[in-house]
Image: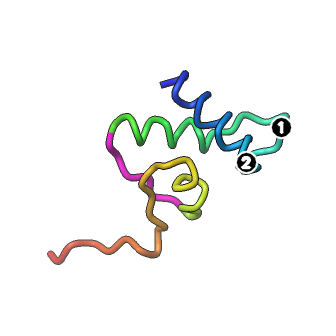
Amino acid sequence: MWRHAAELWAQARLRGFQTAPDHHIDWDVIIASQAIELGAVVVTSNARHFTAYGAEARDWPDITAPPA
């Protein structure tokens, strides 16, 4: 997972995309890498940060509860 996260981070930086300043850990790319490897969906307040890395993500307002 760490190598995959590093590859995603490097590819994004080459495209000029980043979700954290240079001196911070980019948690979004780590979460995105885990989601991709597990086939999981990230539910967040900013899906763009995760879809830019290739992860499937949904914004909180777009999630609806199934009928009871």
Q: Main secondary structure of the magenta part?
A: strand
Q: Which of 53 and 15 is in front in this view?
A: 15
Query: Spatial distance from mark 2 to mark 1, Cα to Cα?
Result: 9 Å
| Left or right for 67, reference 1 | left
The answer to whether residue 57 is above or below residue 59 is above
Percent of width and height locating residue 40: 34, 46
Q: State which region is magenta.
A: 39-44
Residue at the spot x=27%, y=72% of the render?
65
Percent of width and height locating residue 63: 37, 71
Q: In the rendered structure, does residue 27 fall within the stretch colored magenta?
A: no
Circle 1 packing at 10 Å, graded few (<14), some (14-19), many (20+), is: few
| Residue 66 tag number | none
Query: Colour scheme of this structure image?
Result: rainbow
| Left or right for 5, reference 64 | right
Q: Which of 16 and 47 is in front in this view?
A: 16
The answer to whether residue 45 is above or below residue 5 is below
Looking at this view, name the residue that lies furthest to the top: 3
Instruction: Determine whether the residue tagged by mark 2 lies in a helix, strand or loop.
Output: loop
Which amino acid does the dot numbered 2 rest on?
A: Gln
Instruction: Determine whether the residue tagged by mark 1 lies in a helix, strand or loop.
Output: loop
